[in-house]
Image (spheres, coloured by chain):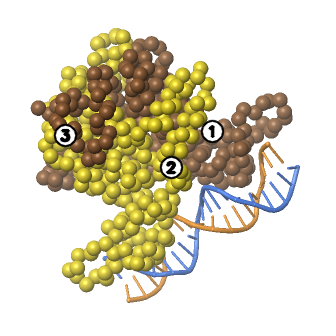
Chain colours: A yellow, B brown, C orange, D blue
Amino acid sequence: MPRTRGRAPDGKGRADALSQEVIVGAAVALLDERGERGLTFRLLAKQLNTGPGALYWHVTNKDELVALAADHVLGDAFATAPRAGEGAGAELRALAIAVFDALDRHPWAASHVTAPATLANALRLLDRIGTLVARTGLPAERHFALSTAISYYITGVSAQIIAPRAPVGATAGRDAFLAQTAERWEELDPADYPFLTRTTADLRDHDDRDQFTTGLDLLLNGLNTTTAGLDQRISPGRTVTGRTAPGGSPQASHPSSR
Amino acid sequence: MPRTRGRAPDGKGRADALSQEVIVGAAVALLDERGERGLTFRLLAKQLNTGPGALYWHVTNKDELVALAADHVLGDAFATAPRAGEGAGAELRALAIAVFDALDRHPWAASHVTAPATLANALRLLDRIGTLVARTGLPAERHFALSTAISYYITGVSAQIIAPRAPVGATAGRDAFLAQTAERWEELDPADYPFLTRTTADLRDHDDRDQFTTGLDLLLNGLNTTTAGLDQRISPGRTVTGRTAPGGSPQASHPSSR
DNA sequence: ACCTGAACACCGTTCAAGT
DNA sequence: ACCTGAACACCGTTCAAGT
């Protein structure tokens, strides 16, 4: 079964000619089926009716191949995310969720989408985020920092949430894993872990996707407040220990605990 | 179950006896020196004066070993983060930055700190975050969601920022990489990438650590606003495309574009 | 209980040789 | 330009055998 993705039928190249796209497509399929460890140049070559060496003509090495595969599935997000003009904030939110969902369909992918963007769809994503951020009316000097922060959140937190599902092993799946982790938490000493030991119920029945949107909304909410907080960008960078300003100056940027 | 937890110094075990701690310590050193690919059971065994098989008595496999190593360096964060009572928000911020810095010292580690927490220091971190969140006075039902959101941000975004530095190759380092990426952005078509093409300067001279704190402050800022937005938790979960509520209900949670 | 080290079953990658 | 496939230089992991 030759896996020939559509080759423009212009020339007389063999119908099953190799190309980077064909290889990446087959890699995605293999990755979906057998996980990152299951992707092998030998196996991939066999499925494409060649030898392993042939693949190296189109792809530098396995790292690049996996990165290209991850970027490929990232592209799915643009199909679902609506361009409609509901306001920049709403579009940002929709785009972020579309990315999460796209990566969620291919658990191996999330951790291979890296920043700063160099591959096609990662570039497209960041540009779109930036364009939307620019539309919010926030000060232009902050566009880059805010856009990359959002971009980091989307891919970083997605990876964090989705990655534990990547190990192809546990067929029992997510629920069993969570239940098992919850059990571990229950056995901890409440004196050492006061929070975890009283929170096991939430762990058991939380929804991963809700988790993603919770933090996302926090972040987008913060965007609202941020216009006034321009000054905050100046001071905290250098404080190595992360201590707040020694003078106890007004820190509108931190949630007050009173 | 070969868990050689603390060896009581009663017997006359060889001074250089193997234990999980010794192995993890040596693994961290090797990881720091030669990166993830440089860590080999053969090499590690040689440095510990044994055969590779011996290691498997104390550690299930390489995945577990790397996870333990990552959790080990995560522990460094607790040394720097001050417990002082500057308010929950400030402490949260300090803790987050301490984690970033700890992971930044061991670029291979960030991507291996996974959620939900199962290893010692990851548990400790999440418990601490939860305890601090509980102190903010936010509604108790939201403590779990908010704490994990913060935790996801810290480890996920750290990984995202730090990971590109992990490849042991590029001795030229981060700056060269950024400059090179900036060049790529400059060559893009402004019609397709309006944002990126006008933002290359920011990419070139941004500071990674500032990037981390920018998003962090956004997130913590959002915490302030969130008390009023309790309702927002209910609706968005099910909307698959990520569209906002169809009725056009008041959406205090999104940045207004006006 | 813990360690040894040879052996198994793989890998990614290269490269001379072909078309 | 592109493909072939054998060969190189490794790996992680297992396991009978030792102490």
Chain letter of disc 3 in the image: B
Mark yes or no: residue B219 visible. Answer: yes
Q: Does the rendering let one see residue A241? A: no
Dots 2 and 3: beta carbons under 8 Å?
no
How much space separates mark 2 and mark 1, taking CA atoms?
32 Å
Disc 1 chain ID:
B
Provide the secondary structure element on which disc 3 rests: loop
Residue farthest along the front direction in this orientation = B247
Quarter of the image for residue A145 reads top left
- The amino acid on which the numbered mark 3 sits, given as a three-letter code, is Pro
Q: Residue at x 61, y 52 (%)?
A: B40
Please tell me which residue is depicted at 43% across the width and 32% down the height of the picture.
B148
Query: Is the residue B3 above or below the residue B62 in the image?
Result: above
In the structure shown, which secondary structural element does the residue marked by tag 2 occupy? helix
Callout count: 3
Q: Is residue B128 above or below residue A23?
A: above
- The front one of A102 and B71 is A102
Residue B25: which disc?
Answer: 1
Check chain identity for marks 2 and 3: say if they share one: no
Badge 2: chain ID: A
> Which amino acid does the dot numbered 2 rest on?
Gly
Residue B138 x/y as whole percent = 37, 20
SS assignment at label 1? helix
| Crowd tier of the residue under label 1, counting other residues whose Cα lies within 10 Å: few below 14, some 14–19, many 20 or above | some
Instruction: Determine which residue is flagged by label 3.
Output: B246
Towards the viewer: A234 or B56: B56
Residue linked to disc 2: A173
Question: Given this view, does label 2 or label 3 mark the residue nearer the observer?
Answer: 3
Asked if the residue at tag 1 contacts the one at tag 3, i.e. Cβ–Cβ closer than 8 Å, the answer is no
Q: Residue at x 49, y 66 (%)?
A: A40
Mark sitting earlier along the chain (3/1)? 1
